[in-house]
Amino acid sequence: MLREIIQYTLKLLSTAILAKYKPKVVAITGSAGKTSAKEAVYLVLCQKFPGKVRRSQENLNTEIGLPLAIIGGENAKRNATLWLKNFLKALQLVLFKDKNYPGALVLEMAADRPGDIDYLTSFVHPDAAVITAIGEMPSHLEFFLERDEYVSEKANILKNLKPRGAAILNYDDLSVRELRHRVPTDRTLLYYGFQKGAEVEVTDFSYNVPESPEDIEKAGMEFSVSVRTWDDSDSADFKIKESLGLPVVYAAAAGIAVGRIFGVSLGDAAKALLKFKPPPHRLALLKGIKGAIIIDDSYNSSPLAAAAALEVLLKFKKNRRVAVLGSMRELGVNTEAAHRQLGQEAAKAAQVVFLIGEETVFAREELEKKRFVLGQNLFLFPTAFDAAKAVENFLQSGDVVLIKGSRGVKLEAVVEEIIAK
């Protein structure tokens, strides 16, 4: 009962704040890539609204968290003092004029259960809505009757776009592309991606892959972006420093597309994205012990995200490639199929694989079909804490170690064990 009261009060207060200050709102959802897209959009919009952009922090993307992001509050959890502070801050924003309130908000929207995004967009009406990626076997599926219901819930972010608002969709993800039919009439539709047909098209993409920890600062990606829209066309070259992976490029493309809607030039977007840093535990390149390179992607996992991470690992042609893979959670009926796919992709990308969590039994079976041998180049552990020391002892100079798994597996324990202190 108390939670319902807090939720309703936060909705009323954040609705009043939005009505009073009228910030531009960019809402972002998807099964993967939301947080990186949020960071890229934030950087690009800072070119348009310098010092006046706020993005939601951490996991403030739910019916409780999203209003807190609008208020500028903190995740109080069970802390009564912090809740009082949040409500007082919200009341102050409603009753008095704050000249420093952001001119633009970049907000994640999560969909863990049916009705989540429908509820959030009932009071947050975006000026621009971004859908990043869904994939064939999305995460958070366990509370949905079927995949189509999940996709439909994600599409609800488009339902309450403001008049003259914009839908920004990933053209390369077929499920997202087909949501064009859910965009309200008289709203702008802008696709981004690598494929022909995207108005914001990525071309000439290449990696700069480090061979040793000392080369991490030189790592990154280069690509060009061509924009073809209703008013004109343009192109520019882009660089992302100290980060690798298609998810980062897709995030940048989403940021460029949002920038286009708000009048940010490609040149200014390119300058902004030079500052892009991956959020913690998301395809972050780190120096490891014994001269190893760590690809820390331990924050969370899904079939789509795991495949992208393994694709990055495969780029390290001159190093021994080690994959530390944890269970992928909240997949519902896709649990077995997704972990079998994980095993197949790991066999192509890695030379040594550590598996953690009971669901990875299916990945083990697929790896053994590819002649991975238990105790030689395939290792199993029930928890990340059990695996951490074993991974440390196994490492050699020049190894590249990908660490990827769902949040509940707590693979950050492995990262902490092998990171260079």
Image (spheres, rainbow, N blue to C red):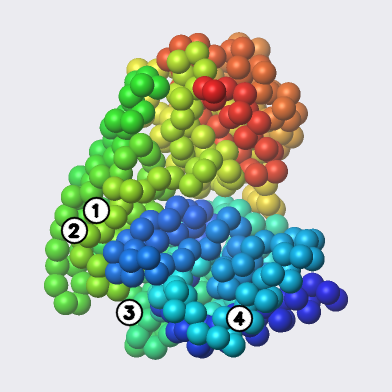
Q: Position of residue 353 (x, y in %)?
A: 57, 23
Q: What is the secondary structure assignment of the residue under circle 4? A: helix
Location of residue 323 with respect to 330 vertically, above or below: above
In the image, which disc is placed on residue 403? Answer: none
Residue where numbered disc 1 is placed: 271
Task: Identify the mark nearer the N-term, 1 or 4.
Answer: 4
In this view, the residue in front, 348 or 296, is 296
Number of other residues with Cα within 10 Å of mark 2, as a class: few under 14, some 14 to 19, many 20 or more: few
In the image, which disc is placed on residue 188? Answer: 3
Task: Check if mark 2's residue and mark 1's residue have beta carbons within 8 Å.
Answer: yes
Q: Residue at x 58, y 73 (%)?
A: 71
Q: CA distance from mark 4 to mark 2?
A: 39 Å
Q: Quadrant of the N terminus?
A: bottom right
Task: Identify the mark nearer the N-term, 3 or 2.
Answer: 3
Q: Amino acid at mark 3?
A: Thr
Q: CA distance from mark 3 to mark 1?
A: 26 Å
Q: What is the secondary structure assignment of the residue under circle 1? A: helix
Q: Position of residue 364 (x, y in %)?
A: 64, 27
Location of residue 361 with respect to 119 vertically, above or below: above
Q: Position of residue 218 (x, y in %)?
A: 29, 30
Front label number (4 vs 2): 4
Q: Position of residue 239 (x, y in %)?
A: 25, 45
Q: Amino acid at mark 2?
A: Gly
Task: Identify the mark nearer the N-term, 3 or 1.
Answer: 3
Residue where numbered disc 4 is placed: 92
Q: What is the secondary structure assignment of the residue under circle 2? A: helix
Q: CA distance from mark 1 to mark 4?
A: 36 Å
Q: CA distance from mark 2 to mark 1?
A: 6 Å
